[in-house]
Image: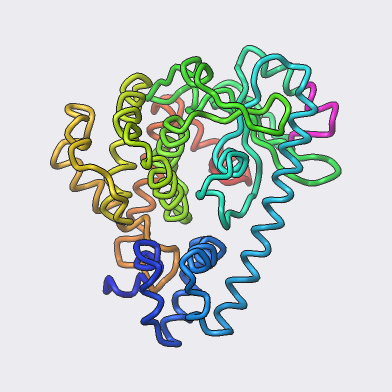
Amino acid sequence: MEKDNCLLIRALIDISVVSDFVMSDWDLFIRQARHANLMAKVYCLLKESNLLEKVPQQALLHLQSRYYISDRHSQSAFYEIDEIGKVLSSITVPVILLKGAAYLAQNLRAARGRLFNDVDILVSKKIISTVEKELWKDGWLSFHNDKYDQRYYRKWMHELPPLKHENRGTVLDVHHTILPETAKLKVDVEQLLREVVPVVGFENVYTFSKTDLVLHSATHLFGDGELEHGLRDLSDLDSLMREFSVSSDFWQELVNRATSLNLQRPLFYAMHYCHTILHTPIPVDFFQTFNEKKPNFLLLIIMDNLFKHAFRPDHKSCDSSLTSIARLILYIRSHYLRMPLYLLLPHLFHKMFFSNKEVV
């Protein structure tokens, strides 16, 4: 596999490379962007750089179409955020938006061209039963009816079983922390809750602070096993870091906050792979601050070979003989990080032989 085949990564690093594309490049580029779920974002990058005139008409129609879909998704997400805020307005503890919903609510660059499959929120575990009851009254119902799945989520995971609105069909994930209860890595969620930022124009709705938005994104990405759209999530981190780093104190605040929350390892991975894959401008000095919390030399070589393959666009033109193997290993790793073996092995056995659903 030649590096030049990954046109999408080249464009995410420097969108001006499209000026040199011929028609065959555009055809491949569009396919890669579609499979990576980044077509709408590419359209935004082209528009911001005044490069739309360089795009052939056929390619432009594909990009515009996906951008219009993302715009409708954003409008729908705004509506859901407003509705959720109203439904939970009687609860005094903040309702915190996560991931894409947070980027959208704070008008961050990472939200531009984003597609929404669901809305994620976080509330204190102390009131999660009250939150679930209020949402149920408004028509948010669990669609995981299997008793094992219900027990799995409620006893071991960091969220309720996903909820779907009975009328609108939209999906809501309600979290009470950012990592499963059984995860090896532990985070003091109360520290996160003390630094939340209100969302202007919405009732009782908040997001994490700038540093915590990055740390949550990093923790989610580098503990997740579903990496077919990993490049999109890495691109989110790249956008967040570029936007927030206009503040001269940002990098030091980010490293300090990661140390306080015990999230140095996922932050190291986020900074390392954003820098090496997407050329995110990160001061080299800050890589030296992780000390014993960063992977050792041998482990980093192994992780480089895994993540650099797994983060390629999920298209055959970017695949190598190692891509599927790398994603499988990282998928297994993610489950090992989420649950100890004495829980994980029975869980996988149950999902394989007693359930038709995919392993969660």
Q: Is there any visible trace of residue 299 in the rendered image?
A: yes
Q: Is residue 186 above or below residue 210?
A: above
Asked where in the image residue 198 lies, by quadrant, the reply is top right
Instruction: Name the residue nearer the viewer: 307 or 56.
Output: 56
Residue 35 seen from this side: no
Coordinates of residue 65 in the picture (x, y in percent):
65, 70
Q: Residue 298: within the magenta?
A: no
Q: Which residues are magenta?
A: 133-142
**Name of the residue lying farthest toward the bottom:** 23
Give the position of the C terminus as an image quadrant: top right
The residue depicted at 62 percent of the width and 45 percent of the height is: 357
Q: How is the image coloured?
A: rainbow
Q: Position of residue 91 (x, y in %)?
A: 73, 16
- Could you tell me residue 41's position as x and y percent? 52, 60
Side (left or right) of 284 relative to 323: left
Query: From this viewpoint, which residue is outermost toward the left?
Result: 297
- What residue lies at 42% left-to-right and 26% top-to-bottom? 183
| Residue at x-position 39% and y-position 62% | 12
Q: What residue appears at the point 57 percent right and 63 percent down from the top-left corner?
A: 40
Residue 280 left/right relative to 203? left
Q: Is residue 188 above or below residue 253?
A: above
Front-most of residues 350 and 49? 49
Pick whichever, 126 or 57, lies toward us: 57
Which quadrant of the figure contains the N terminus?
bottom left
- Does the magenta-highlighted stretch encompass residue 136? yes
Name the spot of residue 280 as percent of width and height, x first.
32, 51
